[in-house]
Amino acid sequence: MAKNYVTTTINGEQTEFLCETQQTLLDVLRDVIGLTGSKEGCASGDCGACSVIMNGRLVCSCLVLGVEAEGATITTIEGIAQGDKLHPVQQKFLEHAALQCGFCTPGLIVASKALLDENPNPTETEARYWLAGNLCRCTGYDKIIRAVMDAAAELRGESVG
Amino acid sequence: MNYIDTSLKVVGTRPIRPDGVDKVTGRAVFAADTRAAGMLWGKVLRSPHAHARIVSIDTSKAEALAGVHAVVTAADFPEIVSEEAFVGEGPMNFRDLSMNCMARGKALYEGHALAAVAATTQEIADRALALIDVQYDVLPHVIDVEAAMADDAPVLHDDLFTAGVDPAPTKPSNVAKVVTFRKGDAEAGFAEADVIVEGRYTTQPVHQAYIEPHACMATYAPDGQVSIHSSSQGHFMVRAYTAKLLGLNLSNIRVNPAEIGGGFGGKTLVYLEPVAVALSRKCGRTVKMQMTREEVFRASGPTSGAAMEIKIGAKKDGTIVAAKQILKYQAGAFPGSPIGPGCMCGFAMYDLPNVDVVGYDVVSNRPKVAAYRAPGAPITSFAVECALDDLALKLDLDPLTLREKNAAKNGTKTHYGPTHHNIGFTAVLDAVKAHPHWKSPVKEGQGRGLACGFWFNIGGESSAQVHVNEDGTVTAATGSPDIGGSRASIGMMVAEVLGVPPTTVRTIVADTASIGFTFLTGGSRVTFATGMAATQAAEKVVEDLKRRAAQTWEIPVEAVEWKDGKAYPAGSNAGAFEPLDLATLALKSPRTGGPIIAEVSVNAQGAGPGFGAHICDVSVDRETGQVTIERYTAVQDVGKAIHPSYVEGQIQGGAAQGIGWALNEEYIYNDKGQMENPGFLDYRVPVASDVPMIEAVLVEVPNPRHPFGARGVGEVPIIPPMAAIGNAIRRAAGVRMHDLPMSPPKLRAALDAASG
């Protein structure tokens, strides 16, 4: 079967790729384009390790087909930092030691950024429910939630130290 | 040298981990993130049957499919004789591991590997698997541990005879081993008891559920040189198993450790690496393999489920006079459950005069169990700590007082032999007593549970190198895969000894050809044992730096001291010289003996056991049976927290895993012995909204056998949660839950039964 030609924007760059019809966006990102920061933990939309922001919406890239990326604007973990300047969510994950093995971290950072884009002042409960689609088996979520709340405060211009 | 009572500048602080930026930007390279030119995809055909004789495997159609380059079955692996392997964590036999990687003669569980293919694309590999024709003779199967022990149970292995019974049996059995531990006279003890509590408890197998599925990439070159890139808890372990299973020399195999996306014990053995090498050997191409989540559940090891009986007798004042336990642990398809630690850990926290523990290691048609955080201990402690709570209720004693009364102290002889030294259990209980959580009144409608946990911790073989680079910065290399931040703690210990900021030390995990042998990351050993090796290597570097300063100044080496990253003349008698810092000494190194490096290998002893106590408040929705964790505090003796944030993280993460074990996680089998919930939707691990903040309280009773006083911390925190939650439910809702998970349907049924 002929491959599909897709034009999309990934992390601000116009990107073209060829993919099989059945290939997911995650397969395309990892195996076709070589952006391996998005992880495959389940390929069924349950773990969130492949989270990306597509047209402003947080999605599991394993549940999106590559061909659906046609004309879309996509942000992956590789596009969260601006050059060498980390996004506050990334910086706070480091400062709060909100990662251990680091495998779920890209998805959690993308999901956290999506949360703060939509809700700059989440309660702890709102943050917990928003991130309930991102599994972390190492941390027990404590430091992740603290990092997200701290990043939110910083983005709002409040310093909580 | 020992730094326990010295003032420390780096150890105990919270710097950003050296691999942190790579991990928050998506740059860190995990096993599945690599590719190679001409790479093929390897995939495994797995048994749909729980128990079947393999009559034949015809791979000809798969081999003929365009794009398929190799197909392997057990016929491509040497037949291995039974031999105990001390390569991984927990009991393992090389022959069993070979047969677990590729079934030989029989498929012993649903998901058991039967054949593997390597093809140019994943899709072709999948099509090839469908073309492999396997003829089975389906056999009756057995899943449950006690059903597997029955006389008429289907027998998995014709050559398995129960060890540890006298006379030796003549009939094969699913009971691989019986172990007993006795101290004093339990029956006499029970005769003296004023009160006795008894109970029967069951736990379910639970999966480690690391988010990264197993993955590797392997190349077998025409000259027999093998390179493997994989995610594991020990690349030397991968090398040893792969060599043995394929009949290769260790020196011909080089294993590069990828970043590892969680393990918790589940990556202390191999599933894919020998298969990928066998495929590559057959076709001469690099082969990449990665499990799907479904394969992880169906084919890789959870920890045991168990059935247990317990009896504890005490005097009216709470002094325990006798304790007895019968433990039946599932091993999965091959012998080797963590029954030994199970028999030891439950009662290890208490000073008991009379103890009788009997354990059974039982095979059944499920995936072979793998280590999971404090293997065996959480299971036994669920029974022991719930029974102690029943005892406290029966005696109308505070559960903390009951534990204080019976707590093991320095000099307490355990029922399994060793005597405790330098332990911090009493300090942990003191910290519980003093904690605001324990002192606060229990809120209306809630219940508060307390439970404790013990783990031995281990040391073992570790190697570390410290290099001073030409500009005075430092590289520290070890052989320990970093699973939760150990590069940070290792680098900090090196920085402390050298007297430099931790940011100038880059810590890496070196491959099997670049560093001395290092036992795997497990048993909570890395910060202890590898930390010891790295500290000693840094000390050797300091000695060398002092020698070079002495040579430069032309004074005796004894007249040089090392302080804050610089060599100083030791006192005015030594002469007046400007201090020499690391950068200056590094610059001068060609004239003072060449490169400045040291490598130290140790076989570390004296790991120092860990003790913890968890306090948990729950509320119970009587209508739905749903349990909400309202507040959670985990207190633990950590010896010395090198990087407190990552110590807290271990404790918080372990507690959350225990919460999942307590409330949700289980394998659901249909009547054919097939797992019905092999995914994260139906095998539900805790998500962020399931848990509250988990307060980790670090108690520091230094371990004198470690230069900074560290004890392992990773395993203890998963031990107390099940009982802490069970005890909280008992006090919130008045029902004792004996069977895990304490899921809504079960709790509803218990509440209904209690209300008659």
Image (cartoon, rainbow, N blue to C red):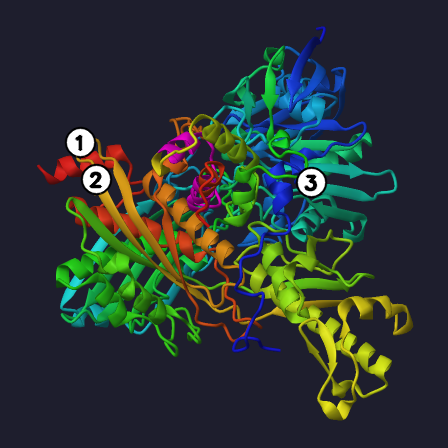
Write down the quadrant of residue B544 in the picture: bottom right
Q: Which mark is residue B623?
A: 1
| C-alpha span from label 3 to label 2 | 48 Å
- What is the x, y in percent for residue B712? 50, 62
Instruction: Using the image, name the chain to which the residue with label 2 belongs.
Output: B
Examine the structure image and report whether residue B206 is included in the region drawn in magenta: no
Where residue A142 sits: x, y (%)? 42, 45
Q: Nearer the viewer, mark 3 or mark 1?
A: 1
Residue at the spot of label 3: B274
User: Do tags 2 and 1 sit on the same chain?
Assistant: yes
| Type of amino acid under label 1 | Glu
Q: Could you tell me the amino acid type at mark 2? A: Val
Residue occupying the point 30% across, 57% down: B451
Task: Give me the residue at 50% from left, 65% from top.
Answer: B711
Q: Residue at x 53, y 43 (%)?
A: A93
Residue at 38% over, 31% down? A129
Residue A69 occupies which quadrant of the picture?
top right
Q: Choose mark 3 or mark 2, whichever is in front.
A: 2
Amino acid type shown at disc 3: Pro
**Magenta-highlighted residues:** A126-149
